[in-house]
Image (spheres, helix red, strand yellow):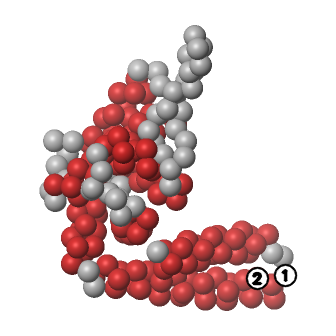
């Protein structure tokens, strides 16, 4: 978990220094920023290598990692994040895992007032990588995710609402895959 947190910090620092480089005018400052970015990128590669070695040392983690990476939109970083920050994946039912990540809809009703359903709580870092995975899945036309997104958009739902619904669907699919130790099948999802 510390390696994953360190990786996130390195990525944030690279982005920050890249933004500074875009605004830098002096050659000396630009040279220094480029050197620092190169150093940070080297550390990021070492961090990634350490994360992959940790997965390779555990047969259970390696099996889960391989299953997760089969799904379009789920890459190495997302798989590693799920393994480290969501160890319950594959052990809970669909409602529990959705609530744990924070993609379960909760009502905002009071008395006769009926409000909109909202998501809240949960594990923010897991939710952010899940969000990016859904965007990748939609772009890559991952069948169950893309079809759900398209159907909801055609029904008049806002993009964010459709994306959150896709996040929950993808999470439920991944949970079932790890629970049953089955490979991804777009036709069954």
The quadrant of the picture occupied by the C terminus is: top left
Residue located at (54% from left, 46% from top): 121
**Badge 1 element:** loop
Most extreme residue toward the top is 112
Q: Nearer the viewer, residue 123 or 31?
A: 123
Q: Does residue 35 sit above or below 182 in this rendering?
A: below
Q: Residue at point 35% right, 40% down?
A: 95
- Residue 88 placement: quadrant: bottom left
Q: Residue furthest right?
A: 26
Left or right: 20, with 115 as reference point: right
Q: Which residue is mark 1?
A: 26
Q: Is residue 78 above or below residue 6?
A: above
- Decide if residue 19 is in sight here: yes
Pointer 2 local density, CA inside 10 Å: few below 14, some 14–19, many at least 20: some
Q: Secondary structure at mark 2?
A: helix
Give residue 18's position: percent from left, percent from top. 68, 72
Residue found 47% across the figure and 25% down from its top: 157
**Where residue 128 sits: x, y (%)?**
51, 54
Question: Is the Cβ of the residue at disc 2 closer than 8 Å to that at disc 1?
Answer: yes
Q: Mark yes or no: residue 135 visible.
A: no
* Quadrant housing residue 71: bottom left
Q: Which mark is residue 53?
A: none
Looking at the image, residue 173 sits to the left or right of residue 25; the answer is left
The percent coordinates of residue 40 (x first, y second) are 60, 84
Residue 174's place in the image compared with 18, above or below, is above
């Amino acid at each position: 978990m510390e390696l994953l947190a360190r990786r996130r910090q390195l990525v944030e620092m690279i982005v920050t220094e890249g933004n500074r480089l875009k605004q830098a005018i002096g050659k000396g400052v630009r040279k220094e920023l480029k050197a620092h970015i190169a150093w940070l990128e080297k550390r990021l590669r070492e961090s990634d290598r350490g994360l992959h070695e940790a997965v390779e040392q555990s047969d259970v983690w390696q099996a889960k990692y391989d299953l997760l990476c089969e799904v379009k939109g789920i890459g190495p970083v997302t798989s590693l994040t799920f393994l480290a920050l969501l160890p319950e994946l594959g052990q809970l039912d669909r409602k529990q895992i959705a609530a744990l990540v924070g993609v379960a809809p909760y009502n905002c009703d009071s008395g006769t007032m009926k409000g909109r359903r909202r998501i809240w709580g949960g594990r923010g870092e897991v939710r952010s990588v899940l969000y990016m995975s859904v965007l990748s899945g939609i772009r890559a036309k991952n069948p169950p995710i893309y079809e759900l997104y398209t159907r909801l958009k055609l029904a008049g739902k806002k993009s964010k609402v459709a994306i959150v619904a896709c996040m929950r669907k993808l999470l439920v699919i991944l949970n079932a895959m790890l629970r049953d130790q089955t490979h991804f099948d777009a036709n069954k999802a």
